[in-house]
Image (tube, helix red, strand yellow):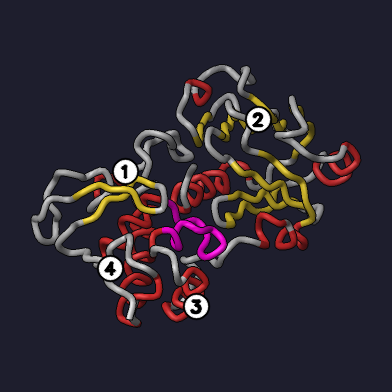
Amino acid sequence: MPELPEVETIKRGLERLVRTKQVVSVDFDSPKSFPNSPADVLQFLINSQIIHVERKGKALLLNLNTGYSLIVHLRMTGQLVYDSGKEHFGAGHPNDSLINRLPDKSTRVSLTFSDASRLYFNDQRKFGWMLLHPTNAVEEITFFRRLGPEPLDPNFKWQDLRLRLARRSRTSIKAALLDQSVIAGVGNIYADESLWGAKIHPATLVSALSATDYKRLHSSLIDILNLSIKSGGSTDRNYVDAEGKKGSYLKFARVFRRQNLPCPRCNTIILKTRVAGRGTHYCPHCQVVKQSK
């Protein structure tokens, strides 16, 4: 599943390509992928104009001039592919549907715009969805209601991070960071990288962290996310950006997928273990488990 920087990268590409486009028709193959009533589609989607593309956590919102939003969650194998005849881009899981003639057998939804260009939502495993919903009521959807705050919000301070993580005081700090109800958009890669930057062992209990730890973690998390967005996202295997280019952040990774290589800070060999059920990378010298007081 894409993490915050990957979805942000896709959002920026879509904002450039589909903003101001007018939707004239929609086709879909299953209500699971497009769970919307025909009446709502006719009234609020057909002939609407996309006025803004937004990201909330790991979801995308195509905000329409009808007061509705088309919410997109790519989940594991989703793609968004835009084709105007002259310009083509693919964003998402990099199978051949990014470059094939569409629609194909993985296409779940296709939007046709007034200039005859199209936006395809492909999803091999049918876990993703496109939901039409009133824009001013998006926060009421269970998915968003359970979503934690955006770590890149300028108002999100280290004290806020501390308060959010305190909800999971008896769990490991990595498990808490992966909980989308605590903080939105952080996944396995950025949890490992930010904890390395803050010199915190991933298995350390939240209750053992000091104010200094929280300050370092907050700063490290923000720096890592911004670096990844600047680099076009982290994934060199599962996701590509809105121009069809692979993300480059992993070239700058300090611990993720660097097991058996020297730590760039102290030269100790990086280890890989499992924390919170996920493969976890850390430096045994820089990141020592702290005990709760």
**Which residue range is magenta in the image?**
175-187
Relative vertical location of residue 7 with respect to residue 107 in this rendering, above or below: below
Amino acid under disc 4: Ala
- From the viewer's perspective, tell me whether residue 186 is left or right of residue 201: right
Q: Residue 163 carries which label?
A: 3
State yes or no: residue 177 in magenta.
yes
Amino acid under disc 3: Leu
> Spatial distance from mark 3 to mark 1, Cα to Cα?
33 Å
Front in this rendered view, residue 166 or 291: 291
Residue under numbered circle 2 = 117
Q: Nearer the viewer, mark 2 or mark 4?
A: 4
State yes or no: residue 240 in magenta.
no
Among numbered discs 2 and 4, the one appearing first in the sequence: 2
User: Crowding near pointer 1: few (<14 within 10 Å), some, many (20+)?
Assistant: some
Q: Under tag 4, what secondary structure?
A: helix
Amino acid under disc 2: Ser
